[in-house]
Image (cartoon, grey):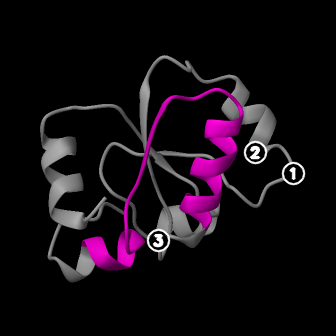
Amino acid sequence: MDVKSYKEMLDNNKGVLLDVRTPEEFSEGHIPGAINIDYNAENFKSEIEKLDKSKQYNVYCRSGRRSAAAMEMMEQSGFNKVINLEGGILGWQEAGYEVKK
């Protein structure tokens, strides 16, 4: 989903915001309200299995690559509503939207 549409969706409180970058990247700045589950961590799959599959998840990473892979893995695990931020947090910042540290 493009940055503008993603922002509008978040403004309307749709879904859970999931940052799949490393904890270090997350602490350097993240979209307000995001929870962090590192896609590259060994326990990523077991961590997402703990989530409520009936909810919508809005995933993002730095550029969109890891979040696209995370979205695919989540869909294969039975999540029906997973939306990826095209361009990741880089695109988000480029659009001038808020990042929390």
Indicate left or right for 59 with 90 as reference. Answer: right
Residue matched to label 2: 44
Residue plotted at (23% across, 83% down): 94
Residue 56 image offset from top left, x and y in percent? 40, 30
Element at label 3: helix
Distance in Å between CA atoms under marks 1 and 2: 6 Å
Tell me, yes or no, whether the two marked residues, 3 and 2, touch with CB atoms within 8 Å. no
In the picture, residue 53 is in which quadrant? top right
Name the mark on residue 28.
Answer: 3
Q: Quadrant of the N terminus?
A: bottom left
Q: Nearer the viewer, residue 90 or 67?
A: 67
Q: Nearer the viewer, residue 2 or 19?
A: 2
Of tags 3 and 2, which is closer to the observer? 2
Magenta stretch, residue numbers: 66-92
Vertical arrangement, residue 60 with respect to residue 76, above or below: below
Tell me, yes or no, whether the two marked residues, 1 and 2, touch with CB atoms within 8 Å. yes
Name the mark on residue 42.
Answer: 1
Residue 7 image offset from top left, x and y in percent? 18, 54
Distance in Å between CA atoms under marks 3 and 1: 22 Å
Residue plotted at (40% across, 45% down): 34
